[in-house]
Image (cartoon, rainbow, N blue to C red):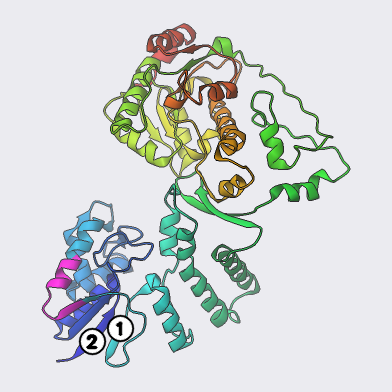
Amino acid sequence: MMQATVIGAGLAGSEAAWQLAQRGVRVTLREMKPQKMSPAHTSEYFAELVCSNSLRGAGLENAVGLLKEELRRLGSLILAAADETRVEAGGALAVDRHGFARRVTEAIRSHPNITVEAGEVTALPETGEVLVATGPLTSDALADHLLARTGGQALHFFDAAAPLVRKLSRPAEEGRTFDTYARLLAAPERKLKVIHRQLKDLLTRGTRRQVENLTKTVSLFRRDHDGMVLYAMDDGQGGTMLCATISDLTAQLRQTLWRQLRPVILTSGTMAVGEDFRRFKEETGLLADSRVMESVSLSPFDYEKNCLLYLPQHPPHQKAADYYNQLAGEIAALLKAAQGHALVLFTSYAAMSAVKERLKGQTPYPLFTMGRNAVHTMEQFKGQPGSVLLATGAAWEGFDFPGDCVSLLIIPRLPFAVPDALKEKERENHPTLRLFIRAVVVPEMQIKLKQGFGRAIRTETDTCVVAILDERSAPGQRHHEAMLAALPDLPQTSSLEDVVEFIYRLKGPDYFREGKE
């Protein structure tokens, strides 16, 4: 009986092993999972879909659909598993990821002609028929071996960037180091070098320059550089972006701006906390510059009359097992008191999603969530008076909500920055963690809070309740005074009845006709 080795149990490897086995070939299927997982893999099953759960078009009027039908008639395991685990996706063939991969794995493991060997393959077998089907998730060791054996001439990975793109399509994960992303750049870096080496003479000058620039950018994020800090952060649209910055920005600002013999005017609504510019001057290298003059202009808005700060008497406790249930209940009560017309500003996408699921069915007001298509969501929210918008990222500072559409601004958590490489670098300049928190962490939270608060009152006639639900901001708690210092003087309450009274006193009759679905 013929024998063959298939390396890699992804879609291609699983299908190849199945087709060979069905034709009487003894197949050894070698797969590194679960002993070694790539950064993109999450389960031990074969044929794991690491990007989309869609296998593209299903109709016979296009080439993709025709190819699927041909594979079905040839006894394709992948198509059989896809058909069994299909989920609704319009004209596309989409599957339940977990069920699909499990179905393929069970079929492979139960086939009498297939033997599965788990463990990383770092070199090709010297004898026998071998099919390599590892694709863009090839381990570094095997990729280096293949490069050495082929000289790169036969090494063409399809969609080498897929694992990275999938990772970047999600919010940045708290606690993840930049190495997590750097590892996913290895395959695109190799692919770009192969493209440049083999195709550079066939590319136009502009395309060749683009490939070269992209290669340099990828290499920048793959290597350590003195004076540079690499980090990942939310892109403001539900994904992650990779960032590189010089570690000493103040030196650059001094060289390019402050040493010039010309006046410079810097203005912003969030440069100072109260009347204190210290944090801004530290960040820009102006702290010790005797030429700096400061001025704070008071807001023309009448916050004492047109705004109310609500701090719940019993705020949700983040460490509680039912925290999100508590938080959603408090938000639902506020929405009822203000009759919708609300913006809820979260500090993480995970919290926003958790609250959204719990609010469904608890409130009669139309509920919108700001995702990647932010502009369209904003139009929907503003076009449906009385509705509720759950948002994070850019909504803290980048959008304007005049009028009654935001008559209730809810901030579940104080916007402390997530620790990253930049903060770790800055932490080295302070002798103790307490001093670092006092000098950097708290002032940055206050500036971010001012930006979020600015969504509430945009014109002299706007009126709004601002609810801060973080237990750390409650009277007597450690960040209460810092929270108040970031905000203008305005009346406070811990009573929902006061919220109702404020809304009924300041809103016109049309306000109360809007909103409910």
Q: Quadrant of the image for the N terminus?
A: bottom left
Say above or below: 157 vs 354. Answer: below
Q: Residue at x 64, y 27 (%)?
A: 273
- For disc 1, the marked residue is 131
Evaluate whether residue 440 shows in this view.
Answer: yes
Relative to 246, 451 lies left or right:
left
Callout 2–callout 1 Cβ contact below 8 Å: yes
Say above or below: 268 vs 143. Answer: above
| SS under mark 2 | strand
- For disc 2, the marked residue is 4
Name the residue furthest right: 261
Crowdedness of circle 2 by 10 Å Cα count: few (<14), some, many (20+)? some
> Where residue 217 appears, x then y in whole percent?
59, 64
> Where residue 86 appears, x then y in whole percent?
21, 57
Query: What amino acid is found at the position of numbered circle 1 in the picture?
Result: Leu
Q: CA distance from mark 2 to mark 1?
A: 8 Å
Q: Nearer the viewer, residue 342 or 485?
A: 485
Crowdedness of circle 1 by 10 Å Cα count: few (<14), some, many (20+)? some
> Where residue 259 appears, x then y in whole percent?
84, 46
Say above or below: 458 vs 192. Answer: above
Q: Reading the chain from its start, which is encountered first: label 2 or label 1?
A: 2
Relative to 378, 424 lies left or right:
right
Say above or below: 363 vs 104. Answer: above
Picture quadrant where residue 277 is located: top right
Q: Quadrant of the image for the C terminus?
A: top left
Q: Residue at x 42, y 25 (%)?
A: 471
Evaluate whether residue 470 shows in this view.
Answer: no
Range drawn in magenta? 104-116
Mark on residue 94? none
